Image: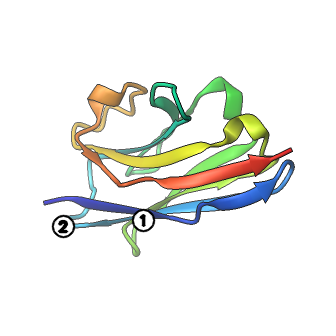
Amino acid sequence: QVQLVESGGGLVQAGDSLRLSCAGSGRTFRGYSMGWFRQAPGKERQFVAAIRWSGTSTYYTDSVKGRFTISREYAKNTVSLQMNSLKPEDTAVYYCAADPSGRNGNRVDEYQFWGQGTQVTVSS
């Protein structure tokens, strides 16, 4: 059984940086795609970024391009999301997700496994 655990969220000011981590257990993620999604209060869960476990392909939603960077560490079986120049509109619960099919997609229904989420709050 795949388990994903996010960490690194917190309360920061606009312009600050945060690094989220997602630790995976239960298996290695060779062939998987790993994604980050976020959900603000009263809104649907939306795609943020994705990466193939091979690291050959990354994909970002337009609103975070140039500010966020997704990466993975083989040895630690983790995926990270470096978030720079944070804005109040980045405030949300951030979720890590895994897609065994490796599609590197941007839809919630493409991802089979999910973490419990970590809160990111950006004050103005």
Quadrant of residue 88 in the image? top right
- Residue type (three-letter) at the residue carrying disc 2: Gly
Task: State the residue at coordinates (52%, 46%).
Answer: 93
Which residue position holds label 1?
78
Residue 2 seen by the camera: yes
The tag on residue 26 is 2
Question: Is 33 displayed left or right of 58 in the figure?
Answer: left
State how far apart marks 2 and 1 are (Cα).
Answer: 12 Å
Q: Position of residue 16 (x, y in %)?
A: 82, 56
Q: Position of residue 73 (x, y in %)?
A: 46, 66
Task: State the residue at coordinates (44%, 47%).
Answer: 95
Task: State the residue at coordinates (58%, 42%).
Answer: 92
- Residue type (three-letter) at the residue carrying disc 1: Thr
Q: Position of residue 74 (x, y in %)?
A: 40, 67
Q: Position of residue 72 (x, y in %)?
A: 48, 59
Q: Is residue 49 above or below residue 79?
A: above
The tag on residue 18 is none
